[in-house]
Amino acid sequence: MLSKEAIRYYATHPAEFVQDIIKANPDPNQAEILNSLVYNQMTSVRSGHGVGKSAVEAWAVIWFIVTHPYPKIPCTAPTQHQLFDILWAEISKWKRNNKVLDTELIWTKEKLYMRGHSEEWFAVARTASTPDALQGFHAEHMLYIIDEASGVDDKIFEPVLGALSTPGARLLMCGNPTQLSGFFYDSHNKNREQYSKFHIDGRNSARVSQEFVQTIINMYGEDSDVFRVRVSGDFPLAEDDIYISLPLVEKSIQTEYIPRKKPDIIHIGCDVARFGTDKTVIGYRTDKKVQFFKKRVGQDTMKTADDIVLLGSLLVDQYKLKKGIDLPIPIKVDDSGVGGGVVDRLRQLKRNNPSRFWWMEIYPVQFGKKIRHKFYDDSTTYMMSVLKRLLSPHDEDGNPKEVEVVLPDDDALVAQISGRKYGITENGKIRVESKKVMKARGVQSPDEADCVLLVCLPVKRPKKKKGAD
């Protein structure tokens, strides 16, 4: 390993440690962040996507564990995917760059430790799904790593603040600025004087392709919240006429989801393309989790119906659903325009082979249809209100509750849900703008969003014998 003199030197020169020992080349922003850990107790980094945050965090862990005696380095993130598949995998990758590091640092699925000191000299991965994730750590040298910090609940930070009373304790938190409140937001606003702050705009990062930047600009505009958060690294604006805010959408994406062996809820939704560049999008929901199955441009209705049958068959096999024991799967299809052909085909398949397709329960849905409701003007607005309730961290009485749906991390979906505006009709009801109005102001057709609205729409099951459509 390193000599005592080298360790003393690198303990105050982390960027050089990364270059010399890990054999990586931090860019100027990354080098500044690393060096901030030497002189500042709390460092907070907000940025767009793809600027190399995970690499910086991984380098910081390796640097600190090598250059500080008997350290403890708790690491956390909102979800297991972010923590283990990204950050923890990044640590494993970089330690392999140096044979000595790879030999002396033992990497496991949840822990990185110095050989021979597994209980005293380590970094550990703890998901931020429970309030005690970062409690119980005590050492002279501490480094807390908070990844995607905007999505971490404030309760997780409470033990960190207590530990930071120790002179040798350090905090590095990084993330996209998705939320307009909370510990991370405050570190760049009302509490900014207490932090060493960094703001990295993806347009100024050599690690972000200009093709990605231009794609986001072309699709959503430089004045959109999607551009602000995912490219420029700025917090979203609080627009009064947006029906579902970006922070609600991003909070859902960053919510931990642990699948069960057999979910209580299995729904399928399909938004059918009508013309031009519109997409046919097929998705499904298992309990809280929403996922996309297929997206296609210009697909005929027969192929779309076949894809829905394929998805349903896969879900039946995966969860071992049985006729007479399990409920059929609600299949909600956009019945407007050419979508009627998909509904007709599915019904035909079930009529011709009811035993095989017992699991299909078909619900045609029309977007924009006028409805009788006290608050909402049409079916699309009602579906948006359902999704908004599922995304909300509070119930109707204002009490805290868990987010009830976990959305996929999809740029198009995020932009479509968080970019849809609303108004009040003459009779005082809420009405979200139509696809036609959205496209007229240069916004993409909300194909992914409409698919999500369908899979989240509750259904009133028919009072018929099982197997009948």
Image (cartoon, rainbow, N blue to C red):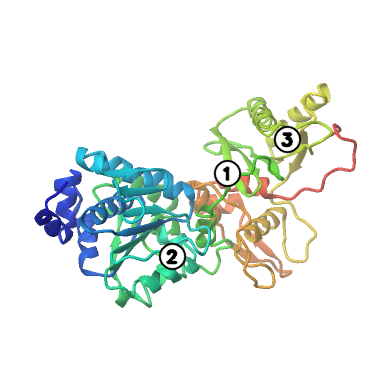
Q: Which mark is residue 219?
A: none
Inspect the image, locate mark 2, and give the three-letter code of the amino acid beneath it: Gly
Q: Marks 3 and 2: which is nearer the front?
A: 2
* Secondary structure of residue under mark 1: helix
Label 2 vs label 1, nearer the camera: 2
Mark with earlier residue (2, 1) = 2
Q: What residue type is labelled 3?
A: Gly
Q: How far apart are marks 3 and 2 (CA)?
A: 59 Å
Q: Is mark 2 on a helix, strand or loop?
A: loop
The span from disc 2 to disc 1 (Cα, nearest Å) is 47 Å
- Residue labelled with disc 1: 447
Most foreground residue, 450 or 359: 359
Quarter of the picture holding the C terminus: top right
Q: Residue furthest front?
A: 116
- Residue lying furthest left in this view? 5
**Between marks 3 and 1, how big is the CA–CA gap?**
16 Å
Q: Is residue 104 left or right of residue 2?
A: right
Q: Which of marks 3 and 1 is nearer the N terminus?
A: 3
Q: In terms of secondary structure, where does tag 3 sit?
A: helix
* Amino acid marked by disc 1: Asp
Q: Quadrant of residue 96?
A: top left
Estimate the x, y position of residue 446 in percent, counting from the top left. 56, 47
Q: Residue 249 location, x and y as percent?
A: 53, 57
- The picture places residue 332, in percent across and down from the top left corner, at 71, 41
Residue that appears at 68% across and 34% down: 319
Of the image marks 3 and 2, the number of the one nearer the N terminus: 2
The tag on residue 340 is 3
> What residue is rendered at 37% in x and 74% in y?
189
